[in-house]
Image (cartoon, rainbow, N blue to C red):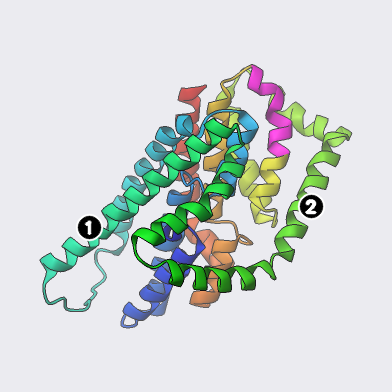
């Protein structure tokens, strides 16, 4: 699961910065901003570890397993399109990589590790779904409860229990003492979304969506551009989805909640690739020492393509 979160962004960017030293900084920064951030967004739209996925699953009441094939379809469709476009953009740039003694053996090891990673992910998803169904817990709570025992059992099979406990305790102690920002974020988010629900402002915003209830494509487009617009103003997608769920709740009786849910997830993670004040963009800006607005401009076309594929998929499900 490490490779489906922020640590993968930091790790991959560090490797790319080191291995692309012979490439012009402008080209290197553009390549890193495109490849790593987009890969993060494409992986996180179907990851059970992503908070946006958990929020939407619980809010819509639709099973995660029902969402999973559609989110994977969106992810791989956008991946294929993006690979083709990036190939055309960068194929003319010369690059000399490191020499590998035995290419076949190196690839074999990589494929084996990828297979193990997919197997671990599959087992983790199965454990989460069984726990959720058996104990009647929400999806987010099931993920939270399963993470530690699952990791402990896997460390046992790897014969690294003591290493896991030592590093895990050290990391837990360090990270727990720096959670105050997230605490403030979620408390203010809760107050904001609940207070907004009691004001006329929600009615005005809701009117914009209900007036187009005969045109679901426009509603799906409004969801995407709400994420993009508020993201450029510095509003986190978690806060945006809290507002959108309040607004869209009445439409769950008109449309299939899964269609709206897919768009809420895709819109949030598509915006993560271009949100100027987002965590991933900020992290990339620090690592590559480039203006975050430059990263936004670079990835905004990808966000629109990503969101458009999401709109098509969601419309099919409505």
Q: Which label sits on residue 187?
A: 2
Q: Tag count in the figure?
A: 2
Q: Nearer the viewer, residue 28 or 194?
A: 194
* Quadrant of the rendered image containing residue 15: bottom left
Camera-nearest residue between 107 and 30: 107
- Answer whether residue 212 is visible to the viewer in this image: no
Query: Element type at marker 1?
Result: helix
Extreme residue in the bottom direction: 22
Instruction: Decide: is 80 above or below 93.
Output: above
- 164 sits to left or right of 230: left
Look at the magenta stretch and give its main secondary structure: helix
Residue for badge 1? 111
Residue 42 horizontal/vertical position (percent):
43, 49
The residues colored magenta run: 243-253
What is the residue that sits farthest to the right in this orientation? 199
The answer to whether mark 1 and mark 2 are in CB contact below 8 A is no
Across and down, in percent, residue 16 comes to 36, 73
Q: Residue at x 33, y 57 (%)?
A: 86
């Amino acid at each position: 699961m490490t490779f489906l979160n922020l640590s993968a962004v930091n790790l991959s960017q560090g490797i790319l910065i080191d291995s692309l030293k012979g490439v012009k900084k402008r080209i290197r920064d553009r390549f890193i901003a495109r490849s790593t951030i987009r890969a993060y967004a494409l992986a996180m739209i179907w990851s059970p570890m992503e908070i946006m996925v958990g929020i939407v699953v619980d809010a819509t009441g639709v099973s995660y397993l029902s969402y999973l094939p559609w989110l994977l379809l969106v992810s791989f469709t956008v991946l294929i399109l993006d690979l083709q476009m990036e190939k055309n953009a960068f194929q003319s740039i010369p690059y000399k990589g490191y020499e590998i003694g035995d290419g076949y053996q190196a690839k074999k090891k990589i494929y084996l590790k990828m297979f193990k990673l997919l197997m671990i992910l599959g087992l983790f998803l199965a454990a989460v779904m069984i726990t959720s169904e058996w104990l009647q817990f929400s999806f987010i709570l099931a993920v939270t409860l399963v993470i530690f025992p699952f990791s402990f059992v896997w460390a046992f099979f790897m014969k690294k229990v003591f290493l896991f406990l030592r590093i895990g305790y050290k990391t837990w102690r360090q990270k727990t003492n720096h959670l105050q920002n997230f605490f403030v974020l979620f408390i203010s988010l809760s107050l904001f979304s609940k207070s907004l629900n009691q004001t006329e402002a929600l009615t005005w915003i809701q009117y914009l969506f209900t007036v187009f209830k005969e045109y679901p494509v426009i509603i799906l487009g409004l969801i995407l551009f709400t994420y993009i617009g508020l993201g450029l103003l510095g509003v986190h997608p978690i806060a945006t989805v809290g507002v959108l769920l309040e607004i869209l709740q009445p439409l769950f009786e008109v449309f299939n909640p899964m269609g709206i849910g897919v768009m809420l997830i895709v819109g949030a993670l598509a915006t993560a690739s271009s949100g100027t004040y987002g965590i991933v963009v900020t992290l990339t800006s620090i690592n590559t020492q480039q203006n975050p607005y430059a990263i936004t401009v670079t990835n905004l076309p990808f966000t629109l393509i990503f969101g458009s594929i999401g709109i098509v998929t969601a419309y099919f499900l409505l």
